[in-house]
Image (tube, rainbow, N blue to C red):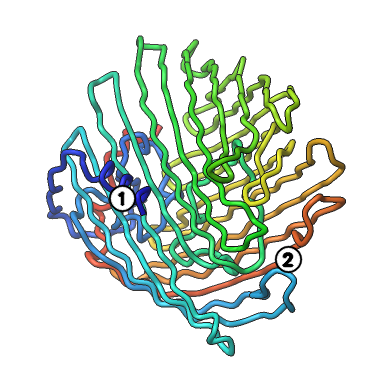
Amino acid sequence: MKLWLGLAILLFSAPLCPAQEPNDTTLDNEEPIPIPVQDTENQKSLAAKTFVDDVFQSVRNSWGFSLSAYQAYTTDISPMYGPRESSGISAVLPRTFFNAGRKKSKFHVDIGAGYRYYERHRDLNSWDYYGDAQYSYQMSKRTSFQITNQLTSSFNDSWSFLSLYSPLHYEPSFSNEVLFNRQRITRNSLQAAADFRLTKKAQFGVFGGFNYYKYPQQNLRNSNAFDVGGRFEYEFTKWLHFSSQYSTYLNYVDEQSRDAQIHRLQLAGFDFRLSHSWSLSASGGVEYTKYQNRNRFGESVSGGIGYTSRNTMFSLTYQRGFTSAIGISRLMTSNIASAELGYRITPRISARLQGYYYRSTEQDYDGLLKTFSGGGGFEFVLLRDLFLSVNSFYQNQQARNFSVDGLGLNRFSAYAGLQYVWPSRKRSDYEPPIRNIQ
């Protein structure tokens, strides 16, 4: 409770000013672009947001709420080592949001709770909890600051009903969130970053974060993970950027002991702006960690290709390096591939796909852990204040010669739901000037 209280004080202590209501209530067939909460997201595509986000994350809406009802099905609600059973799930989820801010500072908070009803398994009925807070401040033309905090607490037998996105704003850089059988998992992610423009072409930034995972089973280990670092970027030309970065990661599994500390130095990173929409990135570096009283070195490799336009977002990335297996406290060498595709087909229809794949090997063991999780769905605007979503997700995890038993998992879930939102979705909620998209 002290942790949550401290985070709430931090996020709510910023100077705020209520945003003004818009006068534009028209909705036409022109393709829109988003008005995000944070200035750093001005160049993101509409495909990165849901239709509910158009209302919730618009600073023109000071406050509002939504009420959602879902019908779901999942193939596996069994606990670890229990018999495999499937079940239908009905869920009701109210959410509320608040936005405030001046031109230089913006604040957003989004809170939700819901109740799940399991058919033929009433003893599994449970509550879900969700909270998201974001604050950004433009200190000057050269300096900006952002901080976000996200909390989820729910059973993991089906994907979060609260959005199309993964349960956390998850960046698979240092950690691998291992999949487990049905249990309540409490997650909290606190991230902060400050950017400083040194010259017209040079930029420096510092960042840090704290990720907390709580598991109810005694054979699993809670996680208190910290990461901090700095990044330098220089623009050689409009189409070629160079970057160098140092970061370190430390995971405490309890109050007395800690997992491996990982140091990562990116020696050379290049970002090629192939066009206004296409970009290609590649980087290489070295890593160091001390695990089980042994010094270890390894290579760090990453690369990716991405496309961003007003209505389309696509990314394909690859990473290789040391990772910490959350929940089982193991140092791994992981190859990580992720893909994401979002498309606003029309102002009233949106589609999204996403997935990631881990192939991880244990240090000092022959254990291999392969994890895949992916899915997506469609959203439809039925009325200005009523949306329909249809989604499905698949998760598969396989372990071979691994030091921890019971990690095999194969689960499919699907759901459809209606979402009512107030205030209703207006054109002014999601259409800023087109010059913001590059």
Q: x, y (%) of residue 112?
A: 35, 64
Spot the residue most to the bottom: 120
Label 2 and label 1: CA atoms lie apart by 37 Å
Residue lying at 34% horizontally and 46% vertically, measured from the top left:
34
Q: Amino acid at mark 2?
A: Asn
Estimate the x, y position of residue 181 in percent, counting from the top left: 66, 66
User: Where on the picture, by quarter, is residue 155?
Assistant: bottom right
Q: Name the residue located 25 percent from the left edge and 32 percent from the top edge.
A: 137
Q: Which residue lies at the image location 61% right of the left edge and 60% below the top edge?
A: 375
Quadrant of the image containing the N terminus: bottom left
* Mark 2 or mark 1: whose residue is earlier in sequence: 1
Say which quarter of the image contains residue 94: bottom left
Q: Which mark is residue 5?
A: 1
- Which residue is nearer to you in this view: 284 or 295? 295
Tell me if residue 351 comes above or below residue 276 in the rendering. below
Find numbered disc 2 in the image and state the secondary structure of the residue it sits on. Answer: strand
Q: Quadrant of the C terminus?
A: top left
Residue at which label 2 appears: 410
Determine the residue located farthest toward the front in the rendered image: 256
- Considering depth in this image, is 286 or 311 the residue closer to the camera? 286
